[in-house]
Image (cartoon, grey):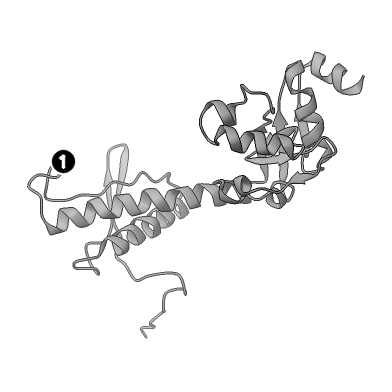
């Protein structure tokens, strides 16, 4: 007989159609269950469909379809699609961050505390914030976290608001840092002393300077 299976606690009931063409497989969702989905529902349908597609061995590429072309003519339904795209872009940041946390091997860079440091020159943090970290004893930076020469984490509000994994998460999986040049010797020493790294890839000159 028939059996009704409820969705998982974080799942949803949705339809997924499959179109097989020469050299291409197209999955269409949802044309069978949700009649007029909200932007939040559209985003959820897209994510759940992509997960189902990945489970079938395909690499998903998501696109929304609407009766309008580049927003014209505009209407309530096309506006919902625009809002769904915006919501997915925001959700993507968290998803990518979670992927980094769950990754079993990560390759990262080590930042210096020189005035030409990338985290400063790119405007990620302000000059006064960088100088405050220096005064607190910071000698090296990794994923927005600052460390003293003896590997102590420098607590500040920069780390708290950085879109990155926590310092503790860095050490929970294999994290390998890449750095080179004499200018990064102290930065490498500081991050290595934290004990969070699984390994470091450096050039010969930097290696000699570290062991001198």
Residue 203 visible in image: yes
Label 1: few (<14), some (14–19) or many (≥20) C-alpha neighbours in 10 Å: few
Q: Nearer the viewer, residue 157 or 31?
A: 157
Residue lying furthest top: 205
Residue at (72, 52) in percent of width and height: 168
What residue would you read off at disc 1? 70
Which corner quadrant holds the C terminus?
Answer: top right
Instruction: Work out whether 99 lies above or below 12.
Output: above
**Picture coordinates of residue 4, whole percent (x, y):** 38, 82
Quarter that holds the N terminus? bottom left
In the image, taking residue 145 as reference, residue 99 lies left or right, namely: left
Q: Quadrant of residue 110?
A: top right
Up/down of 54 relative to 178, above or below: below
175 versus 53 height, above or below: above
Which residue shows up at 25% across the image and 64% down it? Answer: 38
Determine the residue located farthest toward the left in the rendered image. Answer: 73
Residue 5 percent across, percent down from the top left: 41, 79
Give the residue displayed 24% in from the left and 68% down from the top. Answer: 34
């Amino acid at each position: 007989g028939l059996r009704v299976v409820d969705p998982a606690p974080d799942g949803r009931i949705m339809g997924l159609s499959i179109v097989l063409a020469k050299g291409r497989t197209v999955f269409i969702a949802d044309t069978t269950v949700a009649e007029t989905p909200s932007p939040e529902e559209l985003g959820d349908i897209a994510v759940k469909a992509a997960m189902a597609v990945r489970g079938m061995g395909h690499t998903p590429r998501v696109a929304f379809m609407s009766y309008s072309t580049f927003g014209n003519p505009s209407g309530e339904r096309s506006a919902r699609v625009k809002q769904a795209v915006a919501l997915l872009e925001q959700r993507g940041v968290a998803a990518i961050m979670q992927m980094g946390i769950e990754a079993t091997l990560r390759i990262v860079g080590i930042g210096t505390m020189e005035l030409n440091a990338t985290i400063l020159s790119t405007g990620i943090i302000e000059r006064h914030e960088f100088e405050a970290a220096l005064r607190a004893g910071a000698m090296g930076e990794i994923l927005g976290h600052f460390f003293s020469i003896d590997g102590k984490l420098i607590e500040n509000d920069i780390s708290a608001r950085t879109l990155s994994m926590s310092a503790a998460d860095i050490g929970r999986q294999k994290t390998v840092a890449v750095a080179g040049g004499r200018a990064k010797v102290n930065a490498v020493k500081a991050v290595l002393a934290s004990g969070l790294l699984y390994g470091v890839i450096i050039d010969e000159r930097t290696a000699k300077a570290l062991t001198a």
